[in-house]
Image: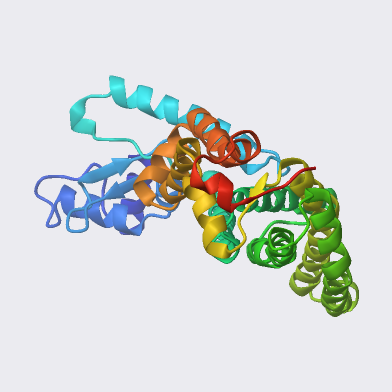
Amino acid sequence: MEEFSKYLRTRLISFPVKREDPIGFYDLFADFLAATDAAVMREGLVGFAKNNKCVARYTGIAIRAEFKKSTGAWEMLDTYDKWVRIQKRLEYFAPASVGGAILVSDQFVSMATQVEAILSTALSIWIACVLVVLVVVLCTGSLQMACLILLNLLCIVAFVVALISYNEMEFGGVEAIALTVLIGMSCDYCLHLSDTILTGRSKSRSRRVVAAISHLGPTIVSAAGTSLLASVPTAAFCTILILSNFGLIMCFSICSGVLFGIFFFCPMCILFGPRYAGRTWAETMTLSIAGSPLHFLSTALFLGFLGGSLFGNFRTIMQNNLIATGVIGFFSVFSPIFVGVFVPPVGAFREKCVKLRY
């Protein structure tokens, strides 16, 4: 009312407003609310109807809170959850006529953007891994090799993300694109190695791996070297930060792809690679899927888990039950490997395939 009385004095109108005044109280008060420069109006803490400024549509409470600039999005998410619980408690005790409360904060908007960016990047990486697995199965016919390549890709992604964090690089759209490109580049080396291992003539897994490295090693290193030489100038001499970060991540990706492909994937093929191999692509595919009842169950579990993670409804259920999803994912990914190592094929499959020793 004090602000209203000052406003009336600037218009040479007496306060309090009398009934016989030509301009009524409601019209004057509506003009005051429309023209006032009060802080409460500028901050948007009170909102009024368009046609009648005397009718308040909402009111807000401004609470000052201090957040460290170094606070990460996931730490801020915990703070946001606490404020949501306070909001729900206020809604529970407030009368129904008041309506629902809305939590508004620039910090929380930034937090939600970062969390969504991270989750979207993780989803794009996982979808790329799933597509790579399907390509490997179609090219080699071995589900067991596809699982080993999937584990190799996940290790490479974790290693590159650790390097990004160690170098204190900000995570943005360019970094997300580079990590997705990393999947395709890293898969290329393993795909050629796995195909050479499966089509080898030796009956020893270790000798097949040695032959594959001897045959493809120089080619893989040369291909990686040309890509690395093309990425080094961008990473070292480019003054635009976005392009420099992209070139640096590409260098990390190329080096880690070659190192993990030769020094991690190949030993994994010796230890956990197929114990039985088909002479043709069709025999290898049939052996992987229907070599025994356990082969079929492991294949159905693995492909079912990958397929479920691509669809929105199933993916939402997985995100809401992370522990159960982790357990199911562990058994889904490792079951084809364990079945291929410990379960021999049955019936006619054992006669057609080649048994591989160490």
170 on left or right of 279 = right
11 on left or right of 229 = left
Figure label count: 0
Q: Eyeballing the image, is 66 above or below 244?
A: above
Q: Nearer the viewer, residue 189 or 210?
A: 210
In this rendering, does residue 135 appear at all? no
Colour mapping: rainbow
Residue 323 in percent (x, y) is at 52, 28
- Residue at 72%, 67% (x, y): give it: 192
Residue 293 in percent (x, y) is at 45, 37
In this rendering, does residue 258 appear at all? yes
Residue lying farthest top?
Answer: 93
- Residue at 84%, 62% (x, y): give it: 211
- Residue at 62%, 61% (x, y): give it: 279
- Residue at 76%, 52% (x, y): give it: 203
Quadrant containing the N terminus is top left
Q: Nearer the viewer, residue 99 or 241?
A: 241
Quadrant containing the C terminus is top right
Q: Eyeballing the image, is 236 above or below 339?
A: below
Residue 336 in percent (x, y) is at 57, 41
Q: Nearer the viewer, residue 231 or 203?
A: 203
Q: Eyeballing the image, is 95 above or below 223?
A: above
Residue 220 in percent (x, y) is at 83, 70
13 on left or right of 296 = left
The quarter of the displayed image where residue 239 is located: bottom right
Q: Nearer the viewer, residue 276 or 15?
A: 276
